[in-house]
Amino acid sequence: MKRRFSIVLAGLAAATSLSAVPAIAGGPTSADIINDAATPGDVISYGMGPQQQRFSSLDKLNTSNVKNLVPVFAASLGGEKQRGQESQPLVYDGTIYVTGSYSRLFAFDARTGEKKWEYNARLPDGIMPCCDVVNRGAAIHGDKVIFATLDAHLVALDRHTGKVIWNKKLADYQAGYSATAAPLIVKDMVITGNSGGEFGVIGEVQARNVDTGELVWSRPTIEGHIGTLGGKPSTMTGKLNASWTGDLWKTGGGATWLGGTYDPGTNLLYFGTGNPGPWNSHLRPGDNLYTSSTLAIDADTGEIKWHYQTTPHDGWDFDGVNEFIPFDATMKGKPMKLGAKADRNGYFYVLDRTNGKLLGAHKFVMQTTWANGIDLKTGRPNYVAENRPGAPNAAEKGKTVFASPSFLGGKNWMPMAYSQDTGLFYVPSNDWGMDIWNEPIAYKKGAAYLGAGFTIKPIAEDHIGALRAMDPATGKIVWEYKNKAPLWGGVLATRGNLVFTGTPEGYLKAFDAKTGAELWKFQTGSGVVGSPVTWEQDGEQYVAVMSGWGGAVPLWGGEVAKTFKEISQGGSLWVFKLPK
Ligand code: CA
Ligand code: CA
């Protein structure tokens, strides 16, 4: 009875304004989730708010006392499934919810670390995750906790018991689809993307009723494909064959594998899209919309309101999936509604988030061989034509070029943070290049669709990883912290003038947000590739992060793999606070 009631109200709320979202007994409402950043007593969304600024207003922990930070507990995920732990914990009502490798979800007591329950998705044998069996986090709403699984399902569990409430198929895993992003909750809908860009899938954003899992709308990211709204076809994405030739749009890629952000002020969802298929760009003339782009999507209808393509006609696997973070700042003396994205291609973009107009594009890595800057008038990169990998012929592969960043990106999935105090973005970046060449390829369902080969190489003696503090107004790098191994974890900024991030070498580290001085570190026993969070509990400030080495780097790292071959696998939730 209670469930039917909430379904009816959820439908009403979707059709009216946010203020009409009903309070759901026993858990966070959509309005609570939108307001997450302003309530430091819990963490009820990926990114600590739908804008994903990853900024906490807490300052009990600060630059003068962070040196005293100690563990409260470490909780092991157990089992033999110790692969990359890229998850961000959620914290609500004395419980920490965290996802683990191989599509697992855990609930731990936030005070003691005692396990409350564990859910293991039963995965089929034929799943095809490209880049490790990771998951980035869950969503919470009412009595549910929801996450995506490697066989491209979305699963809602009772957050008190771990029992399945609903389980919906997002896409066909046998065609190469999978799912690893943390879902986003907006207006009683659970909104998520898909993975599989290396298999010629079609990127898509889906919005589902959070109570039932039924589809509300869907929006494919490749031109020519038709969206849905309310169970019926809605509109075509883009214009058929405007930027793709022949039938290539049918296997065009553009996976939305990192999920999206949301700005309540404009009611826009911002989803990044991955590489076009195949990697070999000579096989697909044109800009290949809407791959390697940011899409602004109306949250109620699934219509694309604007797009900005960071790498038109990508030839380097420069997925444009990175988080587009809404923020407000003054540009050229004018207060503006902005959004920023540090792209895999090595440029940091600042756009007007209301219309997608490019306002700034700044290099944030050592090298970008593929382009000499971005033209602010046209919004397009100034390509260096000879640095595009060459076309193969029937007899031999195409010309090999050295390209930087490597396809693993100036920045990959690991989310940056924005401090409302310093006005800086803290970007976890990597300086590396690759030899890349093209080969012939034809699409085959469920097979890799690259038409390219590569070897990743270091480009600096002293580091690959670099945490960089960027001023979005000027593009100036205010400070940087260099790390020997590639950085692969998320960042957290706090009002205590602190910035936290993890390293593959096993440390969670804290830095002075203004100067970059390293103030504290703790060895967690395995590589840290998760995203730290902070919250207040019983009057004290806590910090939590997942430890567990893995992700794309050890699988694809090439020569770079030497820098981290000694790192042990793991799978633990670490929680810290100051001693009493
Ligand atoms: Ca909160
Ligand atoms: Ca890709």
Image (cartoon, helix red, strand yellow):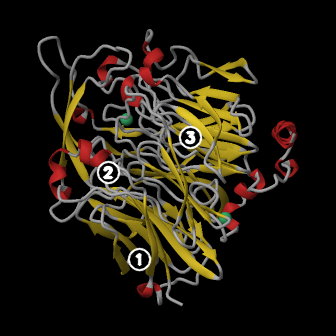
483 lies above or below 275? below
Residue 136, placed above or below residue 75 = above
Amino acid found under the numbered disc labelled 3: Phe
Percent x, y of residue 83: 34, 49
Ligand 1 location (quadrant):
bottom right
Q: Are marks 1 and 3 in contact (CB under 8 Å)?
A: no
Which mark is first along the chain, 3 or 1?
3
Is disc 2 surrounded by few (<14), some (14 to 19) or many (20+) residues within 10 Å?
Answer: many
Question: Which residue carries the number 3 mark?
Answer: 271
Question: What secondary structure is found at the residue carrying circle 1?
Answer: strand
Q: Amino acid at mark 2?
A: Gly
Which quadrant of the rendered structure holds the N terminus?
A: top right
Mark 1 surroundings: few (<14), some (14-19) or many (≥20) residues within 10 A: many
Residue for badge 2: 550
Q: Residue at x 37, y 30 (%)?
A: 128
- Marks 2 and 3 sit apart, C-alpha to C-alpha, by 25 Å
Does any atom of ligand 2 lie closer than 8 Å to the CB of label 3?
no
Q: Nearer the viewer, mark 2 or mark 3?
A: 2
Per the image, the residue denoted by label 1 is 511
Residue 64 visible to the viewer: yes
Q: Amino acid at mark 1?
A: Phe
The percent coordinates of residue 250 (x first, y second) are: 47, 15
Ligand 2 within 8 angstroms of badge 2 C-beta: no
Residue drawn at the location 47% of the way across and 35% of the way down: 122
Q: Earlier in the sequence, mark 2 or mark 1?
A: 1
**Which label is found at residue 300?**
none
Mark 1 to mark 3: distance in Å?
Answer: 30 Å
